[in-house]
Image (tube, rainbow, N blue to C red):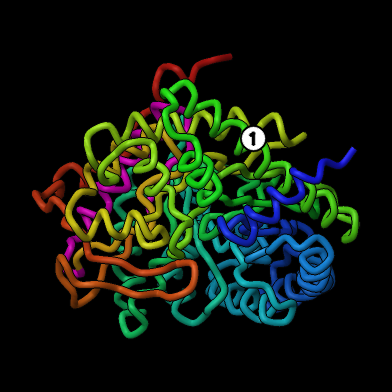
Amino acid sequence: MIDTRDILETITMIQDENLDIRTVTMGISLLDCIDSNIDVACDKVYNKIVKTAKDLVPVCEQIEKELGIPIINKRISVTPIAIIASACKDENPVKFAITLEKAAREVGVNFIGGYSALVQKGFAGADRRLIESIPEALSVTDHVCSSVNIGSTKAGINMDAVATMGHIVKKTAEITADRDCIGAAKLVVFCNAPEDNPFMAGAFLGVGEPDVVINVGVSGPGVVRAALAKSSGLDLTGVAELIKRTAFKITRMGQLVAREASKRLGVPFGIVDLSLAPTPAVGDSVAHILEEIGLEKCGACGTTAALAMLNDAVKKGGVMASSKVGGLSGAFIPVTEDAGMIDAATCGALTIEKLEAMTAVCSVGLDMINIPGDTPPEVISAIIADEAAIGMINSKTTAVRVIPAIGKKVGDELSFGGLLGGGPVMKVNTYSPFKFISRGGQIPAPIQSLKN
C-alpha cells in the first residue's frame, strides 16, 4: 500500500533537498568491433554505439517526466579502447576518441567514458599508444573521458605507469590551458578500478560485463544533511541509524529508475552505485553533512572519523534497498564539485594531506583538486602512488584526478562550470620524490592479496 507521507517526503526531497538520479549510464561492449583496419573498427564502434544507445536519452527524459525524478546525466561507458586498438598496429588511437565524440553527440549523452587502459601489471603495445595519446584525445573532444588503472591489490602498483601518468596529466592540462585545463578534469588514474562504475571520468565497461547493461548512480547529500538538521540531540549511534534510513530511501529511488530504464530499453539492469555525489549547488554537499554532524569546518580534526561513519552508514542503508549494488558506492569528496569542500579549501581548513587521510575511509580518492601549474610531473606521479598504495593495501578503489592549473599559483581559481564546478588552487608539498619515482619497476602486491 502506498503511504501518502512517503510520497510527500519524496517530493520534498526532490524539490527542496537536491535529490536526483545523478546518472543513468549505458555500458556497451565494443569487443565485437575489433578489426585490424582502424577505419573499419571506428565505423563498427560508431554504428554499434548509435544503434544501441539511440533511445537512451529519450527514455530517460520520459521517465523523468512520468515519475517526476530528475535524471541529471545520461552517459555511456565502453570497453577500454586500448583493448579495441590492440589489433590496429601502430595506428594513432585518437581516431577512436574522435569516433566516440561523434557517437556521443549523435545520441545526445553528456559524457562517454572508456578511453582507457588497464596496466596494473604491465603494458601492451596498444596501452602505451593510448596513454601517450590521452592529451591530444582529450583536447580535441568535449564529451570523451579517460582513465588508466595503474594498480590493484592482486597485482601491486606499476610504477613505470605511475611515472608516465605524472607527465600525461601535466601535458593534458597544458594542452587545454586555454580552457581552464579542462582536459585534466576528464582524466582519472585508478587503483582497483571497478568495471561497472557509472560515474565519470572513470567509467568503462569491463570485459566480464554483459554486451549492453544499464548502471545507475544516485545522489542525495542534501537529503542526508536535511534529515540530520531536523533531528537534533542524537548521539553518533542515532546519527548513523538516521543516515542508514535516509540512504535506504535514496537508493530505492535509484533502484526504481534503474529497473524502469532497463525494462523500457530492453537492456539488462546492472547495478546501483550508492555514492553520495555532491554538486557545487548550495545544499548538495558531503562536506556540509560532516559539518552538520558536528565539525566547525570540513577538514577539522575528526573529519576522517565522521566521514568513515557516513560512508559505512550509506553502504549499510543502500545495500538493503537494491538487489544489485556496485560501482564505487560510498561518499564522494571531489573538491571543485562540492560547495562545502570549496569553502573549506578556500579558508585553509582542508588540505591535500587531510584529503588523503579521508580517502582511506571513503570513495574514491583525491578527486577534482586544482594544484599549482608549475607542479613537477614527478610530484603528480608521487600523489598518484600514495593514493594507489592506500587502495592496494586496503583492497578498495582509490583514484587521482588533479588539475595542474597552468599559469596559476596557490589561491588562484579555476572554473569549469556545470557539475565539475571550480575552486581554489591548493598547496602541494613539492619536496622532491624524483629519485623514488624514477626507480620504476613494480611495488609488489601486499601479502593479503594471497587469499586463494
Place of residue 91 in the rendered image (x, y in percent of width and height, measured from the top left): 56, 73
Mark yes or no: residue 34 visible. Answer: yes
Which residue corresponds to the image point at 29% horizontal and 57% vertical from the top-left? 166
- Residue 158 in sight in this render: no
The residue located at (45%, 17%) in the rendering is: 448
Q: Secondary structure at mark 1?
A: helix
Could you tell me what secondary structure mostly forms the magenta stretch? helix
- Residue farthest along the top direction in this orientation: 452
Residue 333 covered by magenta stretch: no
Name the image quarter holding residue 443.
top left
Placement of 66 over or under 391, stated as above or below: below
Task: Please check the rendered image and state whether residue 399 is part of the magenta-colored stretch, yes or no.
Answer: yes
> Callout 1: 10 Å neighbours few (<14), some, many (20+)?
many
Query: Magenta region: which residues?
Result: 373-400
Most extreme residue toward the bottom is 178
Quarter the C terminus occupies: top right
Left-right relation of 24 to 448: right
Residue drawn where x is 53% and y is 69% of the image: 90
The image shows residue 182, relative to residue 293, as above or below, that is below
Disc 1 residue type (three-letter)? Gly
396 versus 374 height, above or below: above
Q: Could you tell me which residue is drawn at 54 percent across and 34 percent down?
A: 243
Q: Is residue 285 left or right of residue 273?
A: left
Point out residue 399 in the picture as x, y percentages from the top left corner: 42, 47
How many discs mark residues in the rendered view? 1
Which residue corresponds to mark 1?
Answer: 318
